Image (spheres, grey):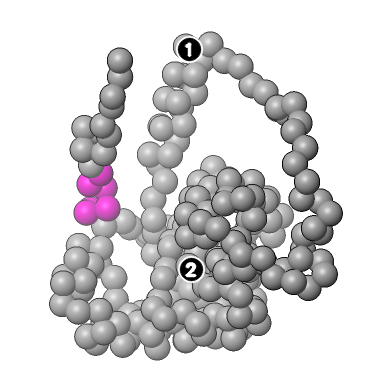
């Protein structure tokens, strides 16, 4: 909760300044690319436990993401409770059954075929952690008045990307899951009206027999994702 009195503009000298040579920057960029290339979305998790502190640290990293007016319009709910994970799985699968029974439309279902998904979501129980990401439509000052959040989808998207990368950096695998609609998550997790569930992120170690769809390894080359205007 933010105090209105804390919102005055006060410039600070840039903290944590880092300086690298051009060669060092390229080496760091190359090293990051090689690491992030080993990130894979998986659907087969081990039930090997993951310490809560690791999850909390990765969420702290996500909380450093830039956001519209620095309003940080996100809330993360981390769940390890087996009973709660089962409840979420059951509710999510109810929505998924409707999705695959025709709610999604033929084109969408066809697009998912190379990924090999269906209405069964056992990972929601097996993965040691589920992280439900909520986007906050508005905030509340310490005096109880509301204030509007800006660029909410963009801000939450950036924070989610940081979280996925942080979990990968820590040695974990993830799966993004977006049943539609997701309003059931507000009720199950007792989140307020101001918050909209965006994603369930399963996190943990891959099972010994984990696989990835071959189609998931097809990445667009640089010349298809980059345009450069360089004088």
Q: Nearer the viewer, residue 14 or 122?
A: 14
Image position of 90 with respect to 136: above or below: below
- Please provide percent x and percent y for residue 53: 71, 55
- Please give the range of residues in magenta: 214-219
- The residue drawn where x is 49% and y is 19% is 25
Q: Is residue 148 above or below residue 165?
A: below
Q: Quadrant of the C terminus?
A: top left
Count of marks overlaid on the render: 2
- Mark 2–mark 1 distance (CA, rounded to whole Å): 39 Å
Task: Please state the horizontal and vertical placement of residue 202, each as a whole percent of the image.
Answer: 50, 64
Q: Nearer the viewer, residue 174 or 1?
A: 1
In the rendered view, would you say 216 is above or below 134?
A: above
Residue 178's disc number: none
- From the image, which quarter does the N terminus lie in? bottom right
Please give the residue where the numbered disc 2 appears in the rendered image: 198
Mark closer to the chain start, 2 or 1: 1
- Binning the other alpha carbons within 10 Å of mark 2 as few (below 14), some (14 to 19) or many (20 upward) gives many
Viewer-closest of 221 and 134 = 134
Give the image location of residue 187, x and y in percent: 59, 86
Q: Is residue 102 magenta?
A: no
């Amino acid at each position: 909760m933010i105090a209105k009195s804390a919102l005055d503009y006060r410039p600070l000298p840039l903290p944590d300044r880092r300086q690298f040579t051009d060669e060092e920057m390229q080496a760091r960029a190359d090293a990051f690319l090689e690491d992030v290339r080993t990130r894979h979305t998986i659907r087969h998790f081990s039930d090997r436990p993951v310490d809560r502190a690791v999850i909390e640290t990765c969420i702290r990293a996500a909380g450093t993401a830039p956001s519209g007016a620095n309003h940080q319009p996100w809330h993360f709910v981390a769940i390890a409770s087996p009973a709660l994970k089962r409840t979420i799985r059951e509710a999510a699968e109810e929505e998924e059954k409707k999705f695959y029974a025709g709610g999604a439309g033929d084109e969408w279902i066809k697009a998912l075929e190379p990924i090999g998904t269906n209405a069964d979501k056992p990972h929601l129980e097996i993965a040691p952690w589920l992280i439900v990401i909520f986007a906050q439509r508005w905030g509340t000052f310490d005096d109880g008045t509301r204030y509007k959040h800006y660029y909410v989808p963009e801000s939450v998207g950036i924070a989610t990307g940081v979280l996925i990368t942080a979990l990968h950096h820590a040695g974990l695998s993830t799966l993004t899951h977006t049943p539609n609609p997701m309003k059931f998550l507000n009720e199950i997790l007792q989140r307020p009206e101001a918050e909209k569930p965006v994603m369930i992120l399963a996190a943990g170690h891959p099972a010994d027999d984990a696989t990835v769809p071959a189609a998931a390894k097809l990445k667009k080359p640089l010349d298809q994702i980059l345009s450069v205007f360089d004088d």
